[in-house]
Image: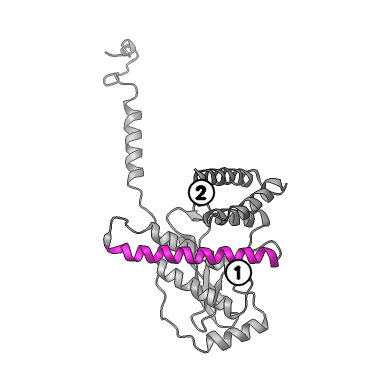
Amino acid sequence: MNLFKGLEKFGLKTEGTENLFEEEKRTNASTEQGEAKEEIPSEESFLLEKSVRCTVCDKVFKTKMIKNGRVKRLEPDFDLRPRFMYIDTLKYDVASCPNCGYTAMNRYFEHLSSVQIKLIKEKICANFKPTGEEPAVYDYDTAINRYKLALFNTLVKKGKASEKAYTCLKISWLYRGKLEGMDEKDASLEQERRECLEQQEAFYNQAYEGFLKAVSTEMFPMCGMDQTTVDYLLAVMSKHFKRYDTASKCISRILSTSSASKKMKDRAFDLKEEIIREIKDSKA
């Protein structure tokens, strides 16, 4: 049926116009095909190399950093582990001098006292062996080893409990990321998965104990986090280890403070409800 019958007198050709929305469908179909063909960007495309001067040996080296304008933030994990599309940015939050071995998370790298520099020179630099050229991108094993080297440096320099705890937390998160990338159906990875789970839990426990000590001995902000954020993190970790009394105290502080955002209070309230359900289920 020609819906435009009668327009011939205007000299217009109206054949093939029976379906008014055919062109729109074709356009949508071509758009969907274009989206399907969109290539996933490489991890390397999110990275840049930045020159850094080592606080210990005073030599300049290049370290990989994230192009902040390139990454798209996703919803974080239950314990605030950050997530980004196409890349795990946690892998690139450590600077490691290839000349002397001094290693630390980026936020701590430049902050050393003369006593700490002396300790690192004596116990790290004197024995450090360079591992050669770095890969273009870090896999999880490489990133974890860099964090472990940072943790060892923190122990040597007698760093704060919060720095050690935060490093342990990020190592645990990296093990979680590694586990997420493993094929659960691949039986050959079963042993490696078990080891990852054990390491993830061990470092998570160290992070928890470290933060508990830090909140009683240090001032806020801590590791770039205010008290509300640390309280929420501790509440989540306390729930994980079934230390419900500690979790409840942290949640109460969040819900009663005026400085906590609505989003944080909503998270704390949801966590409170989860804890109540867990306690009821354990008694059932």
Q: Could you tell me how many numbered marks the image carries?
A: 2
> Which segment did they paint magenta?
188-217
Give whichever of 37, 83 is nearer the camera.
Answer: 83
Q: Residue furthest right?
A: 258
Specify the quadrant of the image occupied by residue 80.
bottom right
The type of residue carrying mark 2 is Glu
Label 2 residue SS: loop
Q: Residues within 10 Å of mark 2 (few under 14, many from 20)?
A: few
Q: Is residue 230 left or right of residue 8?
A: right
**Residue 10 left/right relative to 105:** left
Q: Position of residue 105 (x, y in %)?
A: 56, 70
Residue under pointer 1: 163
Question: Is residue 82 within the magenta segment?
Answer: no
The front one of 45 and 148 is: 148
Instruction: Please name the residue shown 58% across and 67% down the image.
Output: 165
Classify 96 as above or below 267: below
Determine if the magenta segment contains residue 190: yes
Amino acid type of the residue that numbered disc 1 sits on in the rendered structure: Glu
